[in-house]
Amino acid sequence: MVNDPLLLDRARGLWRDLASVPVVFGEEGEVRVVAAPGSRFCPPGWVGVVLLGGATVVTAPTEADADRVREAVAGVPAADLADASVLARTLPIGRVIGPAALAYVSEAAFRPVAPGGLSVERLPAGHPELTALERAAGQADADEAGLDEITSPAFVVRLDGRVAAAAGYRDWPARTAHLAVLTAPGRRGRGLARLTGSAAVRHALAQDLLPQWRARVPASRSVAAALGFADLGSQVSVALT
């Protein structure tokens, strides 16, 4: 049971837009499969699966692929489709991206973090110090965070004169703010992600945007939960062979 139906409606509205074809999320447990060659659920040519509030929408690149997926998911509980191995039982699958948890927060549920003895500064998106932080974090963590894609200011904390953590968001459709948070190795576990993430969420809510936190790793999901985000579903992308 989702505690905030309005929050779920906004999240579903975003992913309806991203499907790029007319589709709606059904009742809890329902799976709807559509052919959507322009879907932004997933990379072009892939199958995208989004579960929100217990209902699933699946986009496929062609009608023939959609038919294959419909046959494969017939009788499969909607929640199970977040696990790509379920599709792999009946479909030839190559690469997989995800699953990633999809979490959202309302202004009423948001739990901001006080700076304490630290100072949160702003830097413009694309600032060289953000690039340096990404290099320090390594390619995998930088790609997971997506800090290089933000359109908002970056909210940063310095330790010993260097940017130790940063957060911001990218403007997505349906007035959504897609959060990006990154902390330097060796500086993790000190609450810096919560602090910078809190500043980015506060900025997004002030613009009447829907903050979205998409995460694959448990540590990131824990940060989102600490800020009041509700875990409403998940996303996974698969390439059929």
Image: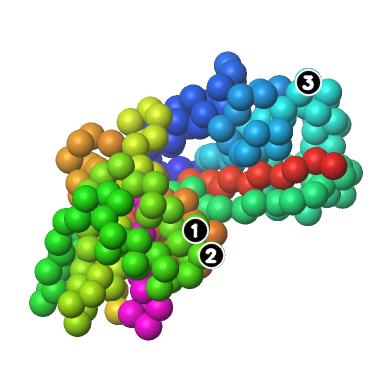
Pointers 2 and 1 in contact (CB under 8 A)? yes
- The percent position of residue 58, horizontal first and vertical second, equals 67, 33
> Amino acid type of disc 2?
Ala
Amino acid type, mark 1:
Glu
Between the residue at mark 1 and the residue at mark 3, the CA separation in whole angstroms equals 31 Å
Instruction: Inspect this view and state whether residue 65 appears.
Output: yes
Q: Say which residue appears at 78% left-offset and 20% top-offset.
A: 63
Res. 63 mark = 3
Q: Residue at x 20, y 36 (%)?
A: 207
Q: Secondary structure at mark 1?
A: helix
Q: Is residue 224 above or below residue 34?
A: below
How many residues crowd around disc 3 within 10 Å: few (fewer than 14), some, or many (20 or more)? some
- Give the extent of the magenta segment: 179-189
The percent position of residue 4, horizontal first and vertical second, equals 37, 40
Magenta-colored stretch includes residue 185: yes
Name the residue tied to disc 1.
144
Real-space Cα separation, disc 3 to disc 2, in angstroms: 34 Å
N-terminal of the pair, mark 3 or mark 2, is 3
Q: How is the image coloured?
A: rainbow
Q: Say what amino acid the circle numbered 3 marks.
A: Glu
- The quarter holding residue 73 reads top right
Q: Residue at x 48, y 70 (%)?
A: 138
Whichever of callouts 1 and 3 sits on the residue coming sooner in the sequence is 3
